[in-house]
Image (cartoon, rainbow, N blue to C red):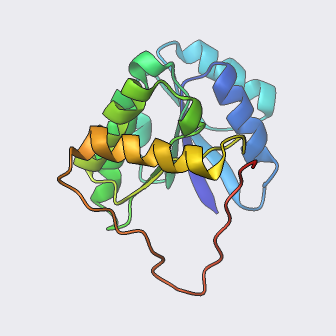
Amino acid sequence: MVRIAIIGAGAVAEIHIQAFKTFPDRCEVRALADLYPEKAEKLAARHGISAVVCKDYREAVARDDVDLVSVCLPPSVHAEAAIAAFTLARRYTDDVQCSAEDATRSDFAFLCRVVEAVIEAGATTVNLPDTVGYSTPDEMQAFFEQILAAVFAGEFVPRICLDRPKDPVEVSCVD
C-alpha cells in the first residue's frame, strides 16, 4: 500500500485524488495539506477520505505514515514543497525519484530551476516525460539537450541506460 500526502487542495488535488482512488488496494491518501484547512477538509469529505488535515505542508511531508508526496500547488510555490519532500525522502532511501508532470509543456526556465533544486535536494532519478505523447523523437532529443545544457552547463554527462537490462522501455511520440 502506498501511503500518500497531497499538498494543496485545489483542482489539481481533486484530479490526483480521483486517480489514486482508482487503485484502492494500492493507494491510500493519509494526509492533505493546505493553507486553508477547511478547504482540505471539504476535499476529504467529498471523496470519503479520512486523511489527517495539515495547515503546513511540512507537517504532512514529515509524517511517518507517508511514502509518496503529490505536490498539487501553483507553479509559483510548487518548488518549495517539492524540495522539502525530496530532502526528507533522501533520509530514508538512496533512490529518490522526481517526475515532472507534463515536462515538455512546462515553462522551460521554471522546469530547469525545479530540476536543479530537486537534484540538489537529493533526487537520484529525474523523469521528464512527454505525458501527452505529442513530441517527435527529434523534439525530445532537442528538449533533453537543452535541459542538460541549461541545468548542468557541460559539467554532467548523463548515464542513459537501465540498471536491469531486461526492463522494458517505452517511448510515446508521434512521428
Measuring 66% from the left and 46% from the top, which residue is drawn there? 136
Observer-nearest of 83 and 30: 83
Tell me: residue 169, above or below residue 157: below
Q: What is the count of numbered marks? A: 0
> Residue 175's x, y, as percent?
75, 49
Is residue 5 found left or right of 118 in the rendered image? right
Observer-nearest of 53 and 116: 116
> Residue 90's x, y, as percent?
30, 57
Measuring 82% from the left and 49% from the top, which residue is drawn there? 22
The answer to whether residue 73 of the structure is visible from this angle is yes
- In which image quadrant can residue 117 be found? top left
> Residue 7's x, y, as percent?
51, 30
The answer to whether residue 58 of the structure is visible from this angle is no
Measuring 44% from the left and 37% from the top, which residue is drawn there? 60
Is residue 1 found left or right of 70 in the rendered image? right
- For the view shown, which residue lies furthest in the right direction? 22
Tell me: residue 105, above or below residue 22: above
> Residue 152's x, y, as percent?
24, 46
Image quadrant containing the N terminus:
bottom right
Tell me: residue 62, above or below residue 15: below
Measuring 38% from the left and 59% from the top, which residue is drawn there? 96
Tell me: residue 38, above or below residue 15: above
Is residue 16 found left or right of 138 in the rendered image? right
